[in-house]
Image (spheres, helix red, strand yellow):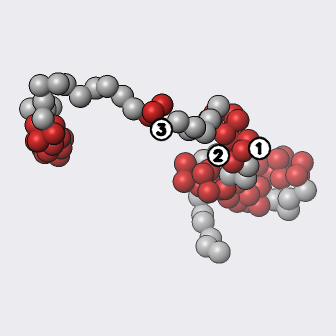
Amino acid sequence: MTSLNIQISDKAVAFAATEAEKRGLPNAAAFAAKLLEETANAHHASEPSVQFYASKTDLNDLFALQRVTAIRDLNDLTADFWPENETADDFIRTIDEVGGAASSGATGP
C-alpha cells in the first residue's frame, strides 16, 4: 500500500468526515481512500475486456437474447455478389489494392 497526501478544501474534508461516520469508517481519510479505491475498481470493471471475461452469462441465454439461430442449410449463407465480367484474379487484385490503400491512408483503387 502507498500513502498519498492531497490538499482539499475544508468543505470537502467536512463532507468526507460526515460520510465516514455514516459508513462506520474511522475518519475522513479512510472515506477518501475507500472512495478512490471503489472509483478505480469501477473504472477497471467498465473496460470492455474485463466485462467480457467477467461475464457469467450462460451462452444459451445469450443466444436467446441475440436471437441467434443454428445454420441448418449452408445455402442460407450463399450470396450472389460476384460480377459476371470479373475473374477471380480481378477480385484478388482489387482486394490487394484496397488492403494497400487502407494501410497508406488512401481511399481505394
Quarter of image, res 92 = top left
- Foreground residue among 31 and 8: 31
Residue topped by disc 2: 9
- Foreground residue among 27 and 82: 82
- Residue 16, x across and y down, in percent: 76, 49
The amino acid marked with disc number 3 is Leu
The reply to whether dot 2 and dot 3 touch (C-beta < 8 Å) is no
Q: Which mark is residue 15?
A: 1
Residue topped by disc 3: 74
Q: Residue at x 81, y 59 (%)?
A: 27
Quarter of image, res 31 = bottom right
Decide which of tag 1 and tag 2 comes sooner along the chain: 2
Which secondary structure, mark 2? loop
Decide which of tag 3 and tag 1 comes sooner along the chain: 1
- Foreground residue among 88 and 18: 88
Q: Is 24 left or right of 88, judged from the image as shown?
A: right
Q: Quadrant of the N terminus?
A: bottom right
Q: Residue at x 11, y 25 (%)?
A: 85
